[in-house]
Amino acid sequence: MSGDGLRHATEGRIDRGTVLRFRFDGTAYSGHPGDTLASALLANGVRRIGTSVRLGRPRGVMSAGSEEPTGVVQLEAPFPDPMRPATMVELHDGLVASSLSGRGRLADRPDPARYDAVHAHCDMLVVGAGPAGLAAASLAVRSGARVILADERPEVGGASPDTEGDDWFDRAGARVLTRTTVFGYYDDNYLVAVERRTDHLGAAAPGNLARERIWRIRAGQVVLATGAHERPIAFAGNDLPGVMLADSARTYLHRYGVLVGRRAVVFTINDSGYRVVADLAAAGVEIAALVDPREATGGTVGGQVGGRYGGHVVVAAHGDDAHGHDVLSTVDIEPVGGGPTVRVDADALLVSGGWSPVLHLYSQSGGRLRYDEVVGAFLPDGCRQAVTVAGAARGLTSTTACLVDGVDAARQALTALGITPVDWSPPSVGAGAEGPPPATAAPGGVPDLRFVPAEDYSTHFVDFQRDVTVADVLRATGAGLRSVEHVKRYTTAGTAHDQGKTSGLLTSAVVGQALDAGIAELGHTTFRPPYTPVSFAALAGRDRGQLYDPVRVTAIHDWHVRHGARFEDVGQWRRSWYYPAEGEGLAEAVRRECVAARTGVAFMDASTLGKIEVQGPDAGRFLDRLYTNVMSTLAVGAIRYGVMCGLDGMVFDDGTVARLAPDRFLLTTTTGNAGPVLDWMEEWLQTEWPDLAAWCTSVTDQWATVAVVGPRSRDVLARLAPGLAVDAATFPFMTWRDTVVAGLPARVCRISFSGELAYEVNVAWWHGLALWEAVYEAGAPYGITPYGTETMHVLRAEKGYPIVGQDTDGTVTPQDLGMAWVVSKKKADFIGKRSFARSDTARPDRKHLVGLLPEDPTLLLPEGVHVVDPACLAGGRLPEPPVPMLGHVTSSYRSAALDRTFALALVAGGRDRIGDRLYAPLDDGRLVPVTVAGPVLYDPEGARRDG
Amino acid sequence: MLLIRCPWCGPRDETEFHYGGAAHVAYPSDPAALSDEEWGRYLFVRENLKGPFAERWCHTAGCRRWFNAVRDTLTNEILRVYRIGEPA
Amino acid sequence: MAEPLETTIRSPLAGWTPHPLTGIRLAELPFRTQVNLRLPAKGPAADAVGLELGVPLPVEPGTTAGSGELSVLWLGPDEWLVVGSPGADLAARLAARRGAGVSVVDTSALRTTVLVAGPRARDLLAHGCALDLHPTRFPTGRCAQTLLAHAQIVLVAVDDGTSGAEPAYHLLVRSSFANYLADWLEDAAVEYR
């Protein structure tokens, strides 16, 4: 069809003086500001704008709103955007779009647009800015409430083209969000919306504005004025381009100045079709036929009608050879119940199967729906959330009724909020206006015709996007499905964009007919968010890239960066992993760093360790209950290693405890567990032991910690802390001193996670970098070497020190780790004690932490690899699965000190297998022999810790 | 997202809270006196009720206080909150 | 904590120069003295601490009390954060009250403070803070521990002295999270350039 003359001379709210250029499927077209892509395509005579997903049938525009199931296009420019309803795409200069076969294409390049989110609060959220919503918002604003009014369209006024003027609405008094779809309604009146902020600006969109914004709205009261969707009717070929929802033809006329055809047939089962006839006829469209299954085809019809077919239905829509078979050319009309067919030429078939109140959000909120036989649709039926439904969303049809209802809804909501509503009505209603008229106007109720009976239902579409027909639904019921939810899954009707908007009631009706059940008893499928599709980009917002998750850094981080450290993430912390010198990889750098720590001096940034100060007269008693060993006997000035277990007796965390004063302790936790340990301590204090006078305060970020490690560490410390007696007798292992280091107030702890002589120097966070640089300078004569987490792991593993979370996994007891010595036998009780007496924790074949030495000293076992007993091998091969596994490797490294590779592993009965040969099956199929050893492979006598 | 009324800080978004399972499961006064069966029951076995359910929450991102809440597991509605030590 | 040593001290956001914005001022207020107090809210200990501070401990959740440079923030039913100017001797004075059921921990270096002020300060914070910061709900003098994006903060509505009508907030953030928070604020503020 040529586009000539399809643009009405005066109708519509478009700016005819401005021409916008756009392309569709490679052809250049023009439109005007105020157009959607759909209206501009229709004005240009483009009827077919896609191909259906399963059956490859031609598809056109069916509606004028977000319920559009078929006019779904791919946007190509300014940026690829898949599956956008053309009815919701505002035209802008330079828009490029193309047709789809039911599936979109994601962009193959990064999206340069910004997306963000905003939290918002209000007394009243009004969803939908049609007459009811505007009236509700207006009363709330006038009554002094904080109001948010959201609507998916570019301007307020609603879907209906019959606006009566809304200059009584004070935009400035409310937060008005246009182009904003409220798509989710969650617990406690939490609603989520997406605002499309820049698409309509095209190339002129400022780059610093977020393209889409997610609104997270917490509302005291919600008024849903979400309107109603017109329903299609199922008949043969009801998906053909040219077949449209009737009232959308009025919207195209009045809003966009577009005639959807030149010669139309109107097929309606309710009175709203009659205003379509009147308006289109007045605009110069020839109405070839008015078809209404009711006997009386209404009263007066304003306008010339070619044929009035009371008691008739449309049975089929066709193309023809002259106009092509992918657009509508003729309409077949028959009497209800069968009879002679009348064929009428038409280029538009406007269908009204009645109206479905839009209750998606209401249903999401937990609201119940009930089927109303008079209205012929589901209506709201009560909700425990603070929500009121107003206007067409509860079945009202006239603008006046909706205005009145909006005011009533707002009055109810305001009263519930404790806000006194002012006495106000929209001027067009006037004081003392009549109440809402009945839901349906005379003549006649809505007949429940949903689909036109036929022999062959294979082109009676119920879900136009998913290509689901009446035949498909009957196949589902024929297969024995009885629930609409099951039919939905079986047929996919109501999935994808549609979500039941145009298909829901139709599907239920077909199921009802097949099962001889009423829609009321069948109910409806569950409405789930989102109401319309939302891009992942919008949902992700700014939680991407660097801001996806906080990156915690220490006070010394910039130094690590400047000195070429490679980093690894430990929880949210970014820690130095190793510091490669020129030409070094991980293995070479770690070897060099390990050698420095074992033979000279090395230092690392240990600031990430969790630190908790515990104060109070009962602090010691409290720690005795938390740790497996005794802490209350610790002398002031001393430090003790401790293990915490869960109630199940499994290791939860480990660290050191320093006694600062009789009633003050400083605990360290593993880097990743600082938060959970503090929460755990607070939980016990608050819920089980409120009688204990003890308080916990996190001080992790208060202190920067530098570990100085190696035989020459004492020399370095002596240079930095001239006031500190550093000799082993005066400052023994597992003690701490407050002193001055490099001119900074410091606490020095003599603890070691490497087996070497070592000190951990703690200063205030803001002095961390100064301390680090001072240590580097003082250590230079000794060749001091910075090291990272990988070297720390190697050094501790050589000593058999486990790392909680790497060598343990929540199924490992202290005894399994070979640390029975850390579990008190004397204390009456502590967390986990009872579980050590369970038969399971006393089994001799539990997995023990042991060392593993590959017989090939150059072979590095992969962490996670299993080990098996040679007794299970058959001919040097693994037996058929299930293979009996003895355990797995938890840590595996190359050791400079041992001059070989080694591993730690959890092995069943491992301590009884020391010296045994086991095998590790590798991914490449090799079975490599390993020897079981004790976990402490380096300096088992502990001779090195005093330097 | 639930709006949970911290007994101290007032209503806050659910993301500020940490869930702590069933409330009023007291630590046994003498664990050593329990059989393995009884201890295992204390550790691992909880009711999974339909309807009002007393449970513990901690306002982790706020005042860090633990408290109790009665939530209807059918509707997700929190019917009431009360401080530790207050009667259920 | 002793007097900061000016030559070696370095705040978590040292070197941060926020991009100029319309209607929003961002700045780090470093090195403020902070002392964490834990004690029963009522009783002789609370009275003694109040006398030492010159203001009673605020017992209403989410409120602050202050006098001059000193402010006391309610963190929990038995927890307060006392905030003073950089180098104040608060910690030493309060340490004398330690024991007898009072926990006193110097946390001056634990958190730094970020100032967010200006007519659009609330708009900026609303991108990541779920609290209702409307002046009727969160007026000057209110404080809250909450989340800004993925960082825990102590949020305080302050009168920053520039103009009484202009919204101003202090965001107390852990030192290790400060860079993340500053990056997040700068990124959120692109909208207001």
Image: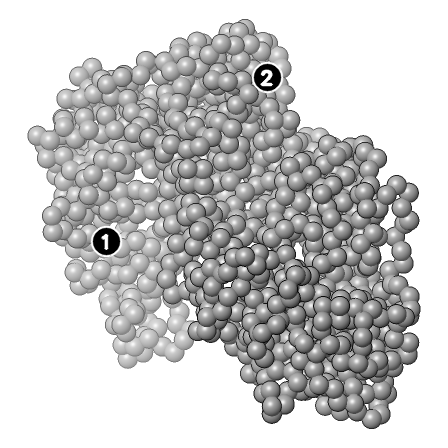
Pointer 1 residue: A893
Give left or right: position of A896 versus A924.
Answer: left
Q: Mark 1 lies on which chain?
A: A
Is any atom of residue A773 visible in this view? yes
Left or right: residue C47 versus residue A76 is right
Residue A925 sits above or below residue A13 on the image:
below
Decide which of C22, A13 is in the foreground and name it.
A13
User: Considering the image in quadrants, where does the N terminus of chain A appear?
Assistant: bottom right
The C terminus of chain A lies in quadrant: top left
Q: Which residue is drawn at 60% across and 40% down?
A: A120
Q: Looking at the image, which residue is at 47% across and 30% down?
A: C23
Same chain, labels 2 and 1 = no
| Disc 2 crowd, CA 10 A, few/some/many (<14, 14-19, 20+) | some
Q: Which chain carries label 2?
A: C
The residue that mark 2 highlights is C58
The amino acid type found where label 2 is placed reads Pro
Q: Which of A15 and B77 is in front in this view?
A: A15
From the viewer's perspective, tell me whether residue A820 is left or right of residue A854: right
Residue at horizontal 74%, vertical 41%?
A168
Residue C60 horizontal/vertical position (percent): 63, 21
Residue A449 visible to an observer of this rendering: no
Instruction: Indicate whether A323 appears above or below A775.
Output: below
Q: In this view, does A53 lie to the left or right of A337?
A: left
- Residue A945 position, x and y percent, is 21, 34
